[in-house]
Image (cartoon, rainbow, N blue to C red):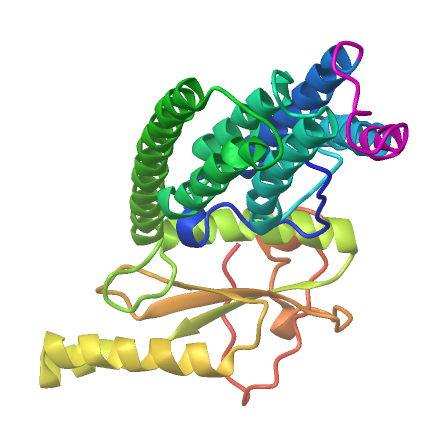
Amino acid sequence: MSTLTGTEPTPADQGAYRGGQYQTMVRGSGFLSFTGGLAVLAILPFYPPTEQIGLWGWAIVIPTTALSLLNGLRGITLQNHPSMNALYLSSFTGIAQAGVLQWLAGGGKAPYVQLIMIPMFGAGSGQPPARCARVVAFAFLVALSPLLYSSIELASTLLEFTLLSILTMMVSFVLSSTRVHRARLKDASEHATELAHLDQLTGMANRRAFDHSIEVAITGARDTGLPLTLLLCDVNSFKQINDTFGHAAGDEALKAIARAMGETVRRPTRRSAGPATSSRSSCVTPTRRRPSASPSGCATPWYARRGVPTAARSRSRPASPSCAS
């Protein structure tokens, strides 16, 4: 029944909403808003909002009900992108709308106050327990508010909303626990994926990551028409380092080289390392320089043969080039 909308969504995997599914929350909120609007339209002919302020009651009810229906449809179709705070506040506005409708209809036996259960259910299914408890407390106050201007069956009202509050909080605790579990599984999966694509010694991307990166880079170069540079680095006399100072020193040398590459190679670049015992590494980067002829008559590289323009000019000091096809 809410008329509150938002423009910038908050990612559902942040803060208290980690592990939540944002689109599902928006669709659910939209469905409840639309259902509440339809329920109001069904009740209005039997309990018109004219008891307190006469025909002016229709001037309040008609626009708010229309907005509830419209926002509900926009939420169901994902045309609306409210933030998580907006979804939270929509529970309060929905409860307040039910309370105002009950007052306009004169209180007593008017059933509008029963519609409070719709935004309460929305809070229980989408909000963390701390926020849900605030919604439940506000709903309790609004449910008892007709005592200020009319009479209600206090005992049955207290029993009904006590049971409803307990169920709402139980749903909130269960779904909140589910979201936390889902977030932990997602973190574990992402960590495992990251480890599977990193060289454990240097922290650089490994061969698996390189194979993926080169395919992405080739596709990007084809789409943009920009040249693509593949740089191979080989440490001079690395075997001598291992033989003279030991493999531990060689490992430290590889780590230092990896740090140096990380500090000097410009983004966007993907740096990859060979096996831990290897002194070879490579990096792939797009460049806006126009391609030039291969140095020293080397054969056309394999990535050039696949239709990717290359930038072969090097700013490094002259060296005996070697080309691998």
Q: Is residue 79 above or below residue 159?
A: below
Q: Is residue 97 above or below residue 105?
A: below
Q: Residue at x 15, y 81 (%)?
A: 249
- Could you tell whether 238 is left or right of 164 in the image? left
Q: Quadrant of residue 24?
A: top right
Whether 53 is among the magenta residues is yes
Residue bounds of the magenta highlight:
45-61
Q: Position of residue 229 (x, y in %)?
A: 61, 66
Whether 271 is among the magenta residues is no
Q: Position of residue 242 (x, y in %)?
A: 15, 78
Q: Nearer the viewer, residue 20 or 110?
A: 110
Q: Is residue 305 visible?
A: no
Q: Residue at x 36, y 27 (%)?
A: 162
User: Magenta residues: mostly which secondary structure?
Assistant: loop
Q: Position of residue 21 (x, y in %)?
A: 50, 36
- Could you tell whether 170 is left or right of 38 in the image? left
Q: Nearer the viewer, residue 33 or 92?
A: 92
Q: Is residue 101 visible?
A: yes
Q: Position of residue 270 (x, y in %)?
A: 50, 63
Q: Residue at x 72, y 59 (%)?
A: 309
Q: Nearer the viewer, residue 151 or 39?
A: 151
Q: Nearer the viewer, residue 130 or 309?
A: 130
Name the quarter where the N terminus is drawn. top right
Q: Quadrant of residue 43?
A: top right
Q: Residue at x 33, y 47 (%)?
A: 187
Q: Quadrant of residue 301?
A: bottom right
